[in-house]
Amino acid sequence: MKRILTAFIFAALLLVVGCNKESKNDGIVRVGLAAGKISETTLEFSVSVINATNCSYLWLKENTEPSIDDIIANGTTIMLSGMASRTIRLDDLEPNTTYHIYVAASNFYSTDTAYLRMATVSDISGDVNPDI
C-alpha cells in the first residue's frame, strides 16, 4: 500500500512540474537588432522578431529617441511576422557619419523596441601615399 501511495504521489508531482513549464511562445513581442557590414556609404543590420505582427525601422543622424508611434508612423515597414529575421541595407549615406537606428515591433498584446548606433567609415580614396 505504501508503494502504491508513493508511486501515486510521485506521478502527481511529475504532472504538476510538467504543467508549470513556461512556454517560449508566450505572445509577448521581442525584437533584436545586430550590426552588420559597414562601408563608406552603406550600413547593414539585422532585425529579428518573435511574435510580431508589425515591425518598422527608422534611421536618423540625431539621437532623438523617437516614440514607438513615431517609429511606426515615420519608419519603413519590414515584412516580418511570427518568428523571423531580415537584413536591412541603408545605401547612399554620408562617409564618417554616425547613424541611430530604431526598431519597433508589435502585436495585439505588446510592443518592443531596439536601438543600434552605427557609423559609416571614412572615405579613404583621397590622398593615399603609396610610398608608406
Image: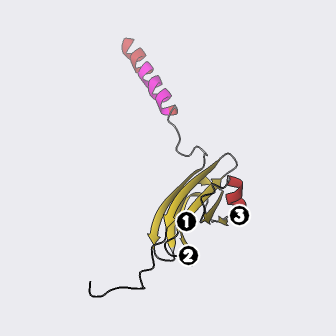
The rendered magenta stretch, by its main secondary structure, is classed as helix
Q: Which comes before the other along the chain, label 2 or label 3?
A: 3
Judging from the image, the colouring scheme is secondary structure
- Total marks in image: 3
Asked if marks 2 and 1 touch (Cβ < 8 Å), the reply is yes
Q: Secondary structure at mark 2?
A: loop
Work out whether residue 50 can be spotted.
Answer: no
Along the viewing direction, whichever of 106 and 58 lies nearer the viewer: 58
Q: On the image, numbered disc 3 is attached to which residue?
A: 74
Work out whether residue 132 can be spotted.
Answer: yes
Q: On the image, numbered disc 1 is attached to which residue?
A: 99
Q: CA distance from mark 3 to mark 1?
A: 16 Å
Q: Secondary structure at mark 3?
A: helix
Q: On the image, numbered disc 2 is attached to which residue?
A: 93
Q: Secondary structure at mark 1?
A: strand
Q: Is residue 69 left or right of residue 8?
A: right
The residue depicted at 63 percent of the width and 56 percent of the height is: 104
Q: Is residue 119 above or below residue 31?
A: below
Q: Is residue 78 above or below residue 132?
A: above
Q: Is residue 36 magenta?
A: no
Q: What is the crowding at mark 3: few (fewer than 14 residues within 10 Å), some, or many (at least 20)?
A: few
Q: CA distance from mark 2 to mark 1?
A: 9 Å
In this view, which residue lies farthest toward the left?
132
Q: What is the crowding at mark 1: few (fewer than 14 residues within 10 Å), some, or many (at least 20)?
A: some
Q: Which residues are magenta?
A: 9-18
The residue depicted at 45 percent of the width and 70 percent of the height is: 37
**How far across and how far down the image is residue 49, in percent?**
56, 56
**How far across and how far down the image is residue 16, in percent?**
50, 27
Q: Which comes before the other along the chain, label 2 or label 1?
A: 2
Q: Assign the N terminus to one quadrant of the image.
A: top left
